Amino acid sequence: MNPDLLILCATVHEISKFFDRYPSESEIKSRSGVSVFSGKMNQKTYDLILTGAGVFNAAHALTAYLEQRTPGFILQTGIAGIFELSGLLVGDVAVATQEHYIHTGVQSDSITHAPLPFDLIKGHPPTRQGIYLLEKGLLNQCYKNLVIAFKDETTMVGRGNFITVSTITASKESAVNLYASFSPVMEAMEGAASAHMALLYDIPFVEVRSASNFVGQRDKSKWDIQKAAQQIPKICSAVSLI
């Protein structure tokens, strides 16, 4: 049966608080070991895939799923690095207005790449640079729901460009350069892959993450993964009300 909502998350550590509040009713494992959980939230049905980290795991897990089922829409969630220059803090939440796999394109003298000479998805020229423009009406409604959900807390809700990387940014200097080039709010490792597959299969897609650390901060004693993970159930609940 096709669910109202498909939730994508890389690891069980990020999503464990969600399961505490919205326990799954069933679990199916694929031949490659990917787990798909099913349950209910706010009178709606959900499927949840633990994709594994990175673009390849995300693309594989979502493709295998979409060959079998067609959800109402897809939510990519989890924890992420927040760019300090965005003005948001650890524990805050952000909605992606576009996703960008920054390693796509033709190498140039700058950190940004020139476009490929062909579309990665036919009829969508921004994919030549790994850019995936997200549907404004859906993400705006998502943003409004999140503002309402977090209105009684100190949590800020932002929105802006997200970047997807395959190499975690490990210095403040690199983080500053990335922000100067792409003006991103968050950095993670799966979003652009999921956005690519959603576009191929013509499924509405949104991405909302909570910040566990500042991008470029490699001292994990300063990260707050638990605080970020605690935001995931509220994120999923707010998005499910769309």
Image (tube, rainbow, N blue to C red):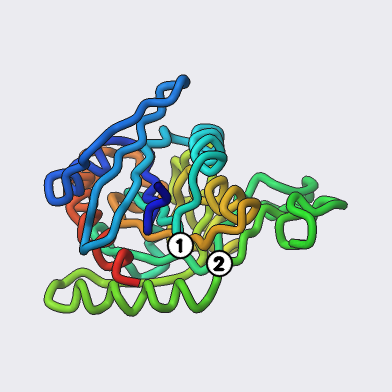
Query: Which numbered circle lies on residue 227?
Result: none
Q: Secondary structure at mark 1?
A: strand
Task: Return the x and y of residue 218 as percentages of the image width and height.
Answer: 35, 39
User: Which residue is denoted by mark 2 in the rendering?
Assistant: 134
Residue type at mark 2?
Leu
- The image quarter in which residue 42 lies: bottom left
Query: Which numbered circle lies on residue 206?
Result: 1
Task: Return the x and y of residue 23 as percentages of the image width and height.
Answer: 16, 44
Residue at image position (43%, 78%) is: 140
Vertical relation: 159 (above or below) 221: below
- The image quarter in which residue 143 lies: bottom left
Q: Is residue 61 left or right of residue 133?
A: left
Residue at image position (35%, 70%) is: 87
Vertical relation: 173 (above or below) 183: above
Decide which of tag 2 and tag 1 comes sooner along the chain: 2
Q: Secondary structure at mark 2?
A: loop
Quadrant where the C terminus lies?
Answer: bottom left
Task: Return the x and y of residue 39 as percentages of the image width and height.
Answer: 25, 47
Residue at image position (43%, 57%) is: 186
Asked whether 175 or 53 is in front, the reply is 53
Q: How many marks?
A: 2
